[in-house]
Amino acid sequence: MDAAPPDKQDLLIDGKRASPSSGAYSQTTDPATGETLASVAVGDGADVDRAVDAARQAAPELRAIGPVDRGEILFDVADRIRDRLDELAELETRDQGKPLSQARSDLAGAAQYFEYYGGAADKLEGTTIPAGPDQLDYTVREPYGVSAQIIPWNFPANLFARGIAPALAAGNAVVAKPAPTTPLSAYRLAELCLDAGLPDGAVNVVSGGGETGAALTSHDGVDTITFTSSVPTGQKVMEAASRTITPVTLELGGKNPAIVYPDADVEEAVSWIDTGIFSNAGQICSAADRAIVHESVYEEFVERMVETAESYSLGPGIDDPDMGPVNSADHLEKIQEYIDVGQAEGARLATGGDTLARNGHYIEPTVFTDVDSGMRIAQEEIFGPVLAVIPYGDDQDPVEIGNDVEYGLVAGVFTNDVRRAHRAARRLDAGNVYVNTWFGDMNQTPFGGYKNSGIGREKGLEALDSYLQTKHIAVNLEGGDAGAPDT
Ligand code: NAD
């Protein structure tokens, strides 16, 4: 097994490696040490043009592959990922920072996406519509053509698969732009897609930063856009897409509430919520950011949560600790700023908040208690291992507190009262609600946000709606001409 990343990573366009037109390269570094891993090509507008052209040429070829065969190719991609799981997981850990076992699980999930959508490729059925006796009405579902995908840095390999597998299953060619700090797995996975028998140009990768992303999402050769990251950049993507009337699927993060009712099993709730906030060092859009806890169990909850947070081992992902470093120095700085903000706002720093005195971007699992819902640490996405615990009393509605943010991605309720659980689930403004669990979504279940958390759904069969457009066909069964126009 050789998991060492290549020293230099060129663009992948039309099945071939290509130097960037500008000759520019940036560095991707190991978050565990700060050391350079590889020089990575920075694509510009000319490179994006070449990649989109290649995808446009590949799109009809891809469409001409029968659905069963297209599915088989995706199954083959899944096998290729599984065959190289150790190598890919190590590459992901080095580039992203996460513990090795979490990277392995991400890669296993990536293989499952290719398998799941491979299985869907020959089931993309239309409908017949009983509109009248003289006409046959039916629909077919057709690929858009070229799908542009901006892949985030928190789950680079897994979310590459989450977007690219359904796009390909539906018959679209893809141009993907990975995040500048985690580009390596996207290149490797794209190569595996091509090795499995997709046409050259069916999957292209153009790495780079915001300018590269903007060149791609504003390109008039792109037919549909999938973007995952922050609200402000999502707004820019939507604005650019409005100029070319291109549909967008946006997944823009969350500030997710976990409500702990007085009748909850507190020990169980703590175990789900700590996994929910500290996995992947909190860099998860569906993290359990806010624990909204009834005052009768508040003290017990805080005590257990602090004890759990303090039991976490923190170190290089490659050693498979409980928590690895965060992805970049810039991101660490952002998290530290929020820890200062929380203290300045008057929340109590119950544990954590410190960095480690070593190279790399490490921050301790952090718990703020006595948080008020109006505080910035309770309103803004920190995207780090920072839990805000908000107490509530009998005169307050925890669902109202839960809904009191701009986001609406996921929410959780912890209770042993089945009616209370379902009533809360109905009232929570969130695309996914977990009852007595966290991260309850699977590859097969639709995932996406209410409110500013986004547009459209990833995962499950619903994700295919982002990659297929419906065509209605009307056939005159009676013959004859149209007759005189109505006057
Ligand atoms: P960002 O929003 O600056 O960039 C995200 C991606 O979009 C990058 O690949 C970037 O190159 C690209 N981009 C930037 N400007 C663009 C434009 N105008 N058009 C098209 N693409 C453009 O994000 P960031 O600095 O990496 O992270 C900021 C915050 O986003 C994080 O702190 C976190 O809160 C959130 N985030 C959320 C998720 C998620 O899963 N929802 C994932 C990663 C980050």
Image: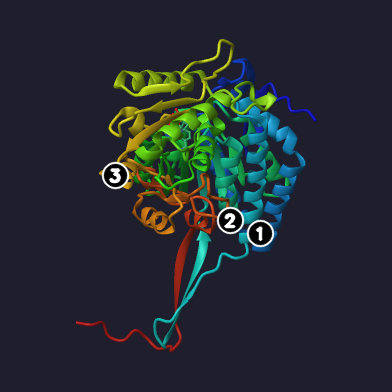
Inspect the image, locate mark 2, and give the three-letter code of the amino acid beneath it.
Answer: Gly
Task: Name the secondary structure under disc 3.
Answer: loop
Q: Earlier in the sequence, mark 1 or mark 2?
A: 1
- Contact (Cβ within 8 Å) of mark 1 with mark 2: yes
Eyeballing the image, is 486 above or below 188?
A: below
Q: Front-most of 388 and 23? A: 388
| Measured Cα–Cα span from mark 2 to mark 3 | 54 Å
Q: Front-most of 464 and 116? A: 116
Please tell me the numbered disc located at residue 65.
1
Disc 2: residue Cβ within 8 A of ligand 1's nearest atom: no
Eyeballing the image, is 205 above or below 423?
A: above
- Contact (Cβ within 8 Å) of mark 1 with mark 3: no
Q: Earlier in the sequence, mark 1 or mark 3?
A: 1
**Residue 13 x/y as whole percent:** 61, 37
| Circle 2 or circle 3, nearest the eye | 3
Can you identify the residue that label 3 sits on? Answer: 394
Q: Is residue 6 left or right of residue 432?
A: right
**Residue 244 x/y as whole percent:** 38, 46
Q: Front-most of 257 and 389? A: 389
Q: Earlier in the sequence, mark 2 or mark 3?
A: 2
Q: Is residue 214 visible?
A: no
Task: Name the secondary structure under disc 2.
Answer: loop
Residue pictured at 70% horizontal, 60% vertical = 69
Can you identify the residue that label 2 sits on? Answer: 171
